[in-house]
Image: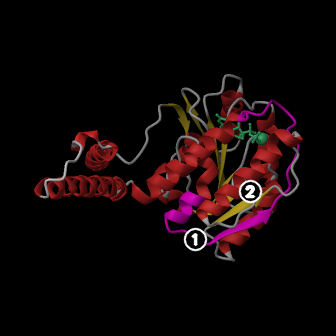
Amino acid sequence: MDISVIVPLFNEDESLPHLAEWITRVMTEHKFSYEVIMVDDGSKDKSWEVIENLSKENPAYKGVKFRRNYGKSAALNVGFTHAQGDVVITMDADLQDSPDEIPELYRMIKEDGYDLVSGWKKKRYDSKLAKNLPSKLFNATTRKMSGIKLHDFNCGLKAYRKDVVKSIEVYGEMHRYIPVIAKWAGFTKIGEKVVQHRKREFGVTKFGLDRFINGYLDLFSIMFISKFSKKPMHFFGLIGSVFFLLGLISVIVLGVQKLIALSNQVPMRLITDSPYFYLALLCIVLGTLLFVTGFLAELMGRNSPTRNTYLIEKELLGDDKEEK
Ligand code: UDP
Ligand code: MG
């Protein structure tokens, strides 16, 4: 199979039929063999009925419905596990991303050898300040911290080589950082394509300003997890050792000073009267705590399953599900 299109959606029943018609048109025109996996992220409207109908009319349309709203990342992750196409395309359901971009994205992965191609909404059609300014800041930080030269990390329209989606895991709010996660998983050929962005015609946006605050916290989690999740002791142990040594050295210095004073019979204040004593004590205690945290993190890392599980209410995935 050439292409899997993954569409995460939450209350998008008005857009879905238009989107499906458009995708089918593009796929047929270019003679791609394809599937469209619609992941209904716990919609309360008629989205699932629409998906059922689409699937009845065209077996290329498949669907998964979550029992409740888990978020876009969870929806993408489930799509990734089921995708069978050589190239996997993700796109938003709200018609803001154009299916006309699919053939070129496919070509970039297949012929130019990219692992991942991210869309770049160079000209955006969202309400101006509320989105554009924070989004510029967000992209600049992520670019700096990850070293990946993308303009628009959060673009819903992206294309992946199949290997990539089978090797990475997205959860929480981490869909914004998929290029970063992919890079750390060893997929470094990451490209960008300017894509057409359109106005939202139906429904409302599902994300508010809080996305940026949480987004930054997620960036820290990702940096931490990718660097240290398999070896938390390297993080906690290092800081712990620094604190502990600092404390230990200070205590020794204090003790030696006192001994010298005593042996010379010079009067000196009690060690516990010195503020350094308390600082040293604090350092030793902190160091020990960090060390213990490191050990606990190691133990937890050893015992936790790597995969997140989601409650799935219904599935429409067809018979060829096992084929890889
Ligand atoms: N979405 C989702 N689960 C959520 C929120 C959003 O699957 O909890 C989907 C939504 O239906 C849409 C895509 O993610 O297909 C992007 O959302 P939206 O268009 O609201 O974001 P914006 O374009 O405003 O950034
Ligand atoms: Mg949108």
Q: Mark 1 points at which residue?
A: 188
Query: Is residue 163 visible in the rendered structure shown here?
Result: no
Circle 2: residue type: Asp
Task: Tell me, yes or no, whether the highlighted magenta stretch contains residue 205.
Answer: yes
Label 2: few (<14), some (14–19) or many (≥20) C-alpha neighbours in 10 Å: many
Ligand 2 quarter of the rendering: top right
Instruction: Using the rendered view, name the quadrant where residue 101 is placed.
Output: bottom right
On the picture, is 129 further left or further right than 220?
right
Circle 1: residue type: Thr
- N-term-proximal mark, 2 vs 1: 2
Instruction: Using the rendered view, name the quadrant where residue 304 is placed.
Output: top left
User: Please, which residue is most extreme toward the bottom here?
Assistant: 112
Q: Mark 2 points at which residue?
A: 152
Q: Which of 53 and 208 is in front in this view?
A: 208
Task: Tell me, yes or no, whether the highlighted magenta stretch contains residue 92.
Answer: no
Q: Nearer the viewer, residue 17 or 173?
A: 173
> Which secondary structure class fits the magenta region best?
loop
Question: Which residue corresponds to the image point at 68% horizontal and 34% vertical from the top-left?
Answer: 210
Gap in Å between the C-alphas at discs 2 and 1? 17 Å
Q: Does residue 53 lie above or below 253 as drawn?
A: above
Range drawn in magenta: 180-209
